[in-house]
Image (tube, helix red, strand yellow):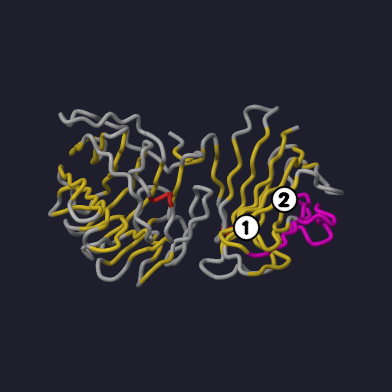
Amino acid sequence: MSGIDTNTKLMLHLNGDDADTSTNDSSGNLHIATFVGTAEIDTADKQFGPSSLLLDGDSDFLTIPDSTDWNILDPTDNTLDLWVKLAENTQEFIGQFIDSANFWTFRTNVGALSFIWRNGGGDAISISGGSVSLNVWNHVAMCKVGTDIGIYLNGVQVAYQGSFTDTNDLATILHIGVGINNQHVNGWMDEIRIQESNFFSASPNVGLTDIITVPNKEYTGDRNTRIRGSQLKDSDVTVDDLSDLTKIEDINFVIDGGGSVISTGVAGDIEISFDAEIQQVTLLSDQTGSVVIDIFKDEFSNFPPVVGDSITASAKPTISASNKSQDSTLTSWTKDITAGDILRFNVDSVSTIERCLINLKIKRC
């Protein structure tokens, strides 16, 4: 079960050091989560990985700016799933709300798993079922397949609504750990994902007979292995599976300013464990701005790479008054990579941009 692909709209692993107050969206969509109150990363309890999100049930939550990615009831199939470990039985996990007449929320209500969608007054959806156990990890999911909607607790369908056709988007921020009723999560959350597909091959039905496969490990990219290191505290890196030696692969490196303009200087290092040739570089940023990034390369024995080891010559990856750039010419670049080489990403200059994805398309030799 991979779990991250081109249909993934949001993927919060909530991995990090204890008491961190930032996290990365591993979907590739560069959504930026803001930690509110004393919300923090916690290494003491988690479902998968090194950590999870700890919320105190009082004033803690996360916010992410509005996006069409949050329109989880649009005409396509959609999946929303996450893990929770709760200390109280009425909690709101995730949702959007404008006012009491326009909101959606995925929650527990006196222990029952519940999903409500209200658009313009009355409830277009209001379903609930099952009993969420306290002080243990539970997997919860909402699956929309066509016009059928089911909610699932630890893989078992517990509620259903059919013939749903209201697809209006709510243009407002996404809240995690709180909702329209101001019922804050008291406990932990992990592996929060929004997917524009029927990922679990769900078949929600009125008889509540459907069962989905509960994830048994942290989601990874489709044919990807995720890499993290202490030197990459604010970055995520993915390297595609290399079983097909003729296939163009992707290396993705995210530089995240944690809600502020990213800093100049060294952003992090990765080791490449195979011979390859760089084919293309792409930059994608969270907003319009400018950034110049250099890439240094050297063998492990000479670590760390320095400015004299730059491979980009006079064609450094650059965004200028935009939010993206792409270069497949790579004029005068040193494009060959030898197994064991270290790549270092360095921000030469930046304006406005708070988060930037660097994608290198490479061909394994």
Q: Please say whether residue 290 is one of the residues in the magenta stretch.
A: yes
Q: Is residue 304 left or right of residue 37?
A: right
Q: Earlier in the sequence, mark 2 or mark 1?
A: 1
Q: CA distance from mark 2 to mark 1?
A: 27 Å
Q: Nearer the viewer, mark 2 or mark 1?
A: 1
Residue drawn 60% across the image and 38% down it:
240
Q: Is residue 87 left or right of residue 13?
A: left
* Residue beneath the point at 44% across and 67% down: 21
**Residue 327 at x, y percent in the picture:** 75, 47
For label 1, the residue is: 323
Q: Quarter holding the C terminus?
A: top right
Query: Which residue type does callout 2 highlight?
Result: Ile
> Residue 195's image quarter?
top left
The segment highlighted magenta reads: 289-316
Q: Foreground: 133 or 262?
A: 262
Residue neighbourhood size for the residue with mark 1, other residues' Cα within 10 Å, grouped as few (<14), some (14–19), many (≥20): some
| Label 2 CA crowd tier, 10 Å (few <14, some 14–19, many 20+) | many
Residue 342, labelled with which disc?
2
